[in-house]
Amino acid sequence: MSKPHRSISICLPTCDRPDLLQEAIASCTSQTEPPDEIVIGDDSKADDTQKLITRLQPVTRIPLNYQRNWPRRGQSANINSVYQRATSSHLILLHDDDLLMPNAVQDLLSCWDQYPDLTAAFGKQYVISHDGHIDLASSEILNRDYLRTQEREGVQPRPWEVGLLRQLPNNGFMVTKEAACAILWRPAEEVGYGGEFDFGLRLSLAYRKFYFVNRYVSKYRKTLGASISSSNKDDAALQGYRIVKSVKLPAEAVHLAPEVLARLAPLAMMQAIRHGHHREAWGIYLSSNHSWRKRLSAGGLRRLLLLLLSQARVVESWCLGRIALT
């Protein structure tokens, strides 16, 4: 019996990184099982990316389904747009600074041969430096921390863990278009920089069948100067903390929430301080999710000092403003 045809679109949102985008596209076109198309959503300010695609389209054997966004959409809307424009039954999300391993499409798609009713399949990620060198030690830690290990291979018995414990990678996974377009990314106005976590969690709560392949299928790049985690605008941990506190979890998953909140609490508190959310920072610091052991640790005391100093600066600024008005 012949296998059912499942078409593949690689969805590639991009913004002002044409050199890295060219590498990402090359990783898509060198697949052992070629995708049917590469869908590119371009949020760039400059024209360099559009010029790159114009050069590549006549010589690339995989169709490049390209769209320049004007006005710019922002990350969430750009990803939703490439999902919706894709013409295939199955999608792979790939950020413009990351890469697919040559076996990615073949390994992920093969999961549907065993389980035709899967929603998503995912594998392991290599961590690479900005110039593309693999960091094996960091790669092992990343995959272990997010439960992408040999003993977890196969259909995941507790689907909610795929999103709640962040087993689902930030990209490089394969998902049915039906599911991706049913969930979509929520706008930054609702979830800030927590869109990846929010999408994965809602996907894992809405669907039941996810497969982990114990093979490396993508490369996650630590991009110089462009990482959200190093940006003053970053609030991914804080948004994740808020999402977990507000989401309705199935009864079987409720016991995991304190573990996830405890993991997020230190960084969430720092981000709350950075954004001037002092009351929320105090709430995190004094919550059961931020234990006395953490409060009295060197890191906990440093966070407390930063919170006090930040509040003091706000009070000082307010006082100076009042003086200036008198």
Image: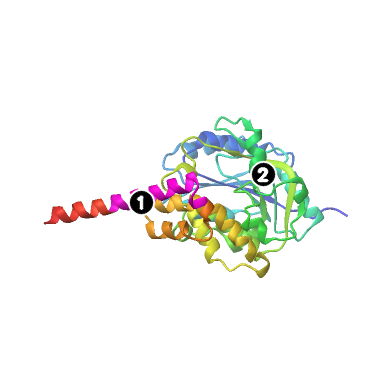
- Label 2 belongs to which residue? 143
Q: Residue 41, position in %: x, y? A: 52, 48
Q: Residue 183: image x %, image y %?
A: 59, 62
Quarter of the image where the C terminus is located? bottom left
- Using the rendered image of the protein, determine whether residue 243 is visible from the camera's viewpoint: yes
| Foreground of the two, 256 or 35 | 256
The residues tagged by marks 1 and 2 sit, at their Cα atoms, a distance apart of 36 Å
Q: In the shown orientation, is residue 237 left or right of residue 126?
A: left
Seen in the image, is 162 located left or right of residue 265?
Answer: right
| Residue 38, magenta (yes or no) | no
What is the magenta segment's predominant secondary structure? helix
Residue that numbered label 1 is attached to? 308
Q: Residue at x 81, y 54 (%)?
A: 114
Say whether marks 1 and 2 touch (CB < 8 Å).
no
- Helix, strand or loop for disc 2: helix
Identity of the residue drawn at 21% across and 54% down: 319
**Residue 164 rendering spot, x and y as whole percentages:** 62, 58
Front residue of this view, candidates 282 and 138: 282
Kind of residue sitting beneath label 1: Leu
Which comes before the other along the chain, label 1 or label 2? 2
Q: Which quadrant would residue 251 be assigned to in this image?
A: bottom right
Whether residue 194 appears in this view of the structure is no
Where is the N terminus found, in terms of image quarters? bottom right
Farthest left residue?
326
- Picture disc at residue 109: none
Whole-percent x and y of residue 212?
73, 51
Magenta span covers which residues? 294-314
Q: SS class of the residue under badge 1?
A: helix
